[in-house]
Image (cartoon, coloured by chain):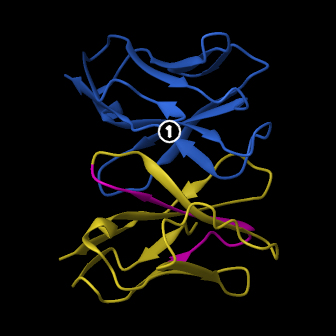
Chain colours: A yellow, B blue
Amino acid sequence: GAGVSQSPSNKVTEKGKDVELRCDPISGHTALYWYRQSLGQGLEFLIYFQGNSAPDKSGLPSDRFSAERTGGSVSTLTIQRTQQEDSAVYLCASSLWGNNEQFFGPGTRLTVL
Amino acid sequence: DQQVKQNSPSLSVQEGRISILNCDYTNSMFDYFLWYKKYPAEGPTFLISISSIKDKNEDGRFTVFLNKSAKHLSLHIVPSQPGDSAVYFCAAPDAGGTSYGKLTFGQGTILTVHP
């Protein structure tokens, strides 16, 4: 069966440019999460969506970061005016709500030059 | 403030021996814990979990122990196999009192199992 997919797998951009990262969750999963892993660090929570509820944006590091989830399925994480410190692997996960097991995608490696 | 800590960045063991990965936490509201395993260029995969009402949970070669008074948990892998070589993360749901929701992760421990 299809797992969580993310695109692109790698993204190299110049400082100051905007980027969009895409996540396709497992069909039927109502909860969707974004995390990022910087070099040598653990996973850092960014934002999560649950059904039609307002997203929990408490982990977004600045107002340059935003995310949306359309139709309760696909999600896009947008980073505006990228900075070098935004370089990281961005991971998306989905789960059935109330279920502790989150299924992760392979991640998007973002490099800001 | 690092609420979940894995103080050993790496661990090296011989095939067939026991691997013990440790994790400490500071938030007393955490009462459910998960271990994830991550191979290079892949996303983390769920391995095993434990609720605070238990002090041990076993699944095949993997056992997780929880010491609530010490705010400490450990993952034991017996016997270790070369295919277990990966980064291991412990994590806790951040909602406090739930077993689901956004996770707070430790920094990870790189396990290398030598043949």
Membership of A31 in magenta stretch:
yes
Mark 1: which secondary structure? Answer: loop
Q: Seen in the image, is B12 located left or right of residue A20?
A: left
**Span shown in magenta:** A23-39
Q: Residue at x 69, y 32 (%)?
A: B30
Query: Can you identify the residue that label 1 sits on?
Result: B1
Rendered view: A34 above or below B88: below
Q: Quadrant of the C terminus of chain A?
A: bottom left
Q: Nearer the viewer, residue A17 or B14?
A: A17
The residue at 78%/58% (across/down) is: A97
Q: What percent of the width, then of the height, locates residue B35? A: 53, 34
Q: Looking at the rendering, which quadrant does residue A52 occupy?
A: bottom right
Q: Residue B67 at x, y = what percent?
A: 63, 12
A70 to the left or right of A38:
right
Give the residue type at disc 1: Asp
Q: Chain of mark 1?
A: B
Res. A64 visible in picture: yes
Q: Which residue sits at x=45%, y=74%?
A: A6
Quarter holding the N terminus of chain A is: bottom right
Question: Could you tell me residue B70's position as x and y percent?
Answer: 60, 11
